[in-house]
Amino acid sequence: MSSTNTTTTCQEAAMITGLGVATVWVLDQDRAKEFFVDKLGMEVRDDLTLGEGGMRWVTVGAKDQPDLMLTLMVPGPPTHDPETAEQIKALIAKGALGAGAFTTDDCEGDYRAMKARGVNFLQEPQKRPYGVEAIFRDDFGNWFSLTQPSAKLDESVGWS
Amino acid sequence: MGRPDLAQLHRLRLAKDVMDRDWSQPIDLDAVAAEAGYSRYHFIRLFREVYGETPGQYLSRRRIERAQDLLRSANLTVTEICMVVGFTSLGSFCNRFKRQVGMTPTEFRARARTEGAGRIPGCFALFWAGGFRAGTPHAATFEKSPENRDP
């Protein structure tokens, strides 16, 4: 087979169309669910336990984005051996892990509402070339950005 | 003493977050330690064990990093930036800056402005700068090596 044909075959193969599930490592699934729903205003998508004492699958998502959800997972077996699980938990608690950036159409408003609900902010809304951004942690220590994207890059504003 | 448990790590992180949030303000270490629920001495010892440097070293490093950002982008004098990031003496600011960055604030500004701005979102810049000092493993030792000595 010529290289041209190989390329054509690759292009015709199915392509990834999006990101559906992302994992947030947390220390407690009940408290995590409470945080993402009560403090961030997200909705619960699933809360299932597979069999007696089996894995608990808890997912949440933004109300306006049905095709992406976060799975709230506690480090532990069978994915992690006990020592690894303890190390990941320590990293979460000491604040070394981040879990992503949320988008909003009103960073300032969300900041005020979330702060009133007791969310721990590291940075109040600030202008960036790509929008207005605040930074907060969940109750376990994971950090998140809260970004209101601007229509177009404004390079006159600093990046950090 | 054993490794700090999750509850202790949580309290230390909250105290570190205070420094990340209020780096430009005068920060009273006793108050930060009290926020974490520790005496000053115990807090400094635990913080250093977990984050690899003392709270004072950490705060100073953050302030210099914020100063670098301002030197790159803000239309302020070196003296103004020194005050904005929470130093009270220009001399100690410049000394500390040179030690951390390898050049004076003025040299840094001249160089940074010819190289153009980066394109890394601020949240990542913040956590890069506010993370862990390069080359510092989980420091379990408390004796002072020359490079770790408080300024």
Image (cartoon, coloured by chain):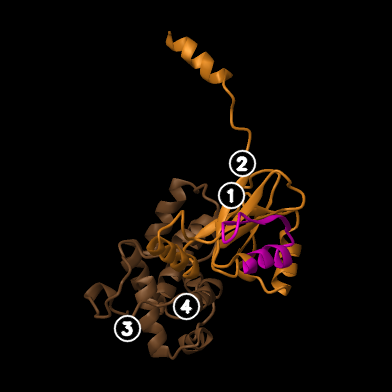
Residue at numbered disc 3: B1
Check if residue B106 falls in the magenta segment: no
Mark 1 or mark 4, whichever is nearer to me:
1
Q: Residues within 10 Å of mark 3 (few under 14, many from 20)?
A: few
- Range shown magenta: A30-57
Secondary structure under badge 3? loop
Q: Is residue B81 above or below residue A102?
A: below
Residue for point 44% across, 47% down: B114
Residue for point 43% across, 12% down: A3
Q: Horizontal and vertical percent for residue B145?
A: 22, 76
Residue at numbered disc 4: B12
Secondary structure under badge 1? strand
| Same-subunit check for callouts 3 and 1 | no
| Same-subunit check for callouts 2 and 3 | no
Kind of residue indicated by mark 4: Leu
- Please report, as a chain letter, where disc 2 is located: A
Residue at numbered disc 2: A19
Residue sitting nearer the eye, B103 or A64: A64
Q: Residues within 10 Å of mark 1 (few under 14, many from 20)?
A: some
Residue at numbered disc 1: A22
Chain with colour orange in the figure: A
Relative side of A153 to B92, left or right: right
Of all residues, the one furthest to the front in this rendering is A52
Of all residues, the one furthest to the bottom in this rendering is B39
Residue sitting nearer the eye, A110 or B6: B6
Q: Horizontal and vertical percent for residue B26?
A: 51, 82
